[in-house]
Image (cartoon, helix red, strand yellow):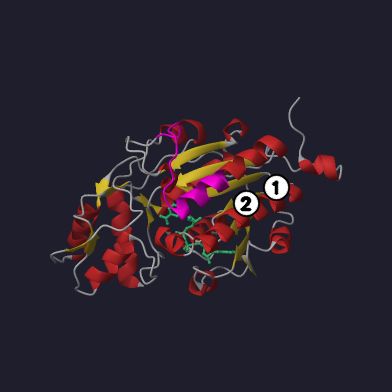
Amino acid sequence: MGLRSPLDRKTGARRRSHQNPRHDTKADSMAFGHLHEAPLMAKYLVTGGAGFIGSHLVSALHARGDSVVILDDFSTGSRANASSLPPSVVLMEGSITDPSVCGRATEGVDYVLHQAALPSVPRSIEDPIATNLVNVTGTLNMLIAARDAGVVRFVFASSSSVYGETRELPKTEAMPCTPCTPYAITKLAAEQYCQAFHGLYGLETICLRYFNVFGPRQDPDSPYAAAIPIFLRLLHAGKPPVFFGDGSQSRDFTYVANIVRANLAACSAPREATGGVYNCACGNRVSVREAAEALQRLLGTSITPVTMPERPGDIRHSHADITKARAVLGYEPETSFEEGLAETVEWYKSA
Ligand SMILES: NC(=O)c1ccc[n+]([C@@H]2O[C@H](COP(=O)([O-])OP(=O)(O)OC[C@H]3O[C@@H](n4cnc5c(N)ncnc54)[C@H](O)[C@@H]3O)[C@@H](O)[C@H]2O)c1
């Protein structure tokens, strides 16, 4: 006998089912190319929806006709992102560290795309307590709220950082995780909570391990900004890109539209996919130096980079094996690094 949903046990109410969703594959294929069949006009909660990745998820869901609620406290997200959204998108301002806020946000929700987090490794090294509170306790609050609201599926934004110092490449989900920063530890702990909620309460959870995401709306001015937006800002201002180390460290840079595809695929994947973790990347490796050179070509600049000492907690190489996400979720990273970079540069120039 399968697990019964918590709502069955607590209230006797029938939980909304992931089976037999209505479909609109045409809208999906227009916006994102080939995708699994996706439920039409379901209600989605995007936590962290005012942030970089969350705002792209919100736009994609709205574009295909879904009902969307955002829960965000604007600690790292942008009011500009939120104000540019259509009025039908409901914005709840509040923190996932408050269980009552999480409860209100999940009312009537079918799918939770949980992006809210303090997303920076250096920030977590400076203030591990704050990162733990949002990323672990906040995720636990969201899981409890989702379970109690009878949410159909809970998709969690995890991170490649959970692999830590494991040297073997490419990273597969079967490898042991050795997280070496507070941020990475919070992401692994949150993944394990997701898996426990799947096993204990039958909540359908899927954890997506994002690898170095980039694209439009990524904040280049934050003190914790990522490499590509920082390079873009510096080069655009005629300044040299700064490498921590010699620039040979490499990343599986992933354009944000691919992350959107992975989230939508996770929502429509068969039930057998739930309870799992999946790498979410391009399956390629580009060095930081090569990324800066590609940006220089697109911007028409030729500025000699500056090197600084390596930073604590920085991982040398990161490269995903995406076989599992391809096979089980039907995920395909349709936008290449070069295409994504060109779109990002165009956005930056016009912003
Ligand atoms: N950008 C990447 O390369 C990357 C890589 C791996 C994983 N991730 C994960 O993806 C998710 C989104 O990252 P992002 O790059 O869009 O970062 P972001 O900072 O742009 O977005 C995070 C959002 O969460 C919100 N938030 C933070 N604390 C909150 C709280 N207590 N309550 C409600 N909202 C809160 C922020 O205001 C922001 O809008 C995060 O969970 C991050 O850890 C990102």
Q: Nearer the viewer, residue 80 or 203?
A: 203
Asked if the residues shown at circle 1 and circle 2 are in contact, with their CB atoms under 8 angstroms apart, the answer is: yes
Q: Which residue is mark 1?
A: 151
Q: Is residue 246 above or below residue 265?
A: below
Circle 1 Cα neighbour tier, 10 Å, few/some/many (<14 / 14–19 / ≥20): many
Q: Secondary structure at mark 2?
A: strand
Q: Position of residue 167 (x, y in %)?
A: 32, 38
Residue 67 on image: x %, y % = 64, 57
Number of numbered discs on residues: 2
**Residue 190 lies in the magenta-colored region:** yes
Q: Nearer the viewer, residue 111 or 186?
A: 186
Q: Is residue 63 above or below residue 200?
A: below
Sooner in the amino-acid sequence: mark 1 or mark 2? 2
Structural crowding at the residue carrying mark 2, measured as other residues with C-alpha within 10 Å and reported as few (<14), some (14–19) or many (≥20) = many
Residue 163 appears in the figure: yes
**For numbered disc 1, what is the local secondary structure?**
loop
Q: Amino acid type of disc 1?
A: Val
Q: Quadrant of the N terminus?
A: top right
Q: Would residue 25 be visible to someone looking at this image?
A: no
The magenta segment is: 172-191
Query: How far across and how far down the image is residue 10, in percent?
Result: 84, 44
* Residue at figure coordinates x 26%, y 64% from the top left: 231
> Which residue: 66% across, 35% down?
199
| Identity of the residue furthest to the right in this view | 12
Q: Which residue is mark 2?
A: 112
Mark 1 and mark 2: span between their CA atoms? 7 Å
Q: Position of residue 304 (x, y in %)?
A: 13, 65
In the rendered structure, the answer to whether residue 153 lies left or right of residue 243 reads right
Give the side of residue 261 with respect to residue 109, left or right. Answer: left
Queried whether the magenta region covers residue 92, the answer comes back as: no
